[in-house]
């Protein structure tokens, strides 16, 4: 989110979810749904592989 200068609120709006939903996943309390990962990838112009590799850096 930081690379794209996007807040949790903005990410939630982008993927059509609530702020609490996104916050729980960003803080690793719960797992992301594959459909949410696909929406994030579309919004950021990344493949799922790119998103995962960038997240682990």
Image (cartoon, rainbow, N blue to C red):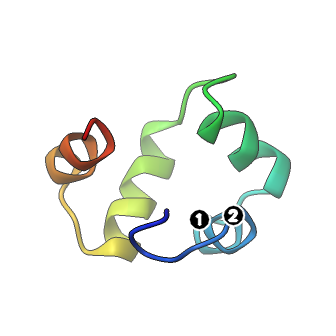
Image quadrant for the C terminus? Answer: top left
Residue under pointer 2:
12
**Measuring 22% from the left and 65% from the top, which residue is drawn there?**
46
**Measuring 48% from the left and 65% from the top, which residue is drawn there?**
2
Q: Is residue 30 above or below residue 42?
A: above
**Measuring 61% from the left and 67% from the top, which residue is drawn there?**
11
Q: How far apart are the alpha carbons under marks 1 and 2? A: 5 Å
Q: Quadrant of residue 29?
A: top right
The 10 Å Cα crowd at callout 2, few under 14, some 14 to 19, many 20 or more, is some
Residue 15 - label = 1
Q: Position of residue 43 (x, y in %)?
A: 40, 75
Q: Position of residue 17 (x, y in %)?
A: 72, 58
Q: Secondary structure at mark 2?
A: helix
Q: Is residue 28 above or below residue 35?
A: above
Q: Secondary structure at mark 1?
A: helix
- Along the horizontal axis of the image, is 51 left or right of 3? left
- Using the image as rendered, state which of residue 2 and residue 11 is in the foreground: 2
């Amino acid at each position: 989110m930081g690379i794209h200068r996007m807040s949790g609120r903005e990410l939630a709006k982008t993927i059509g979810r609530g702020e609490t939903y996104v916050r729980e996943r960003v803080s690793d309390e719960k797992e992301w749904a594959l459909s949410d990962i696909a929406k994030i990838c579309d919004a950021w112009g990344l493949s799922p592989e790119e998103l995962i590799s960038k997240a682990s850096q």
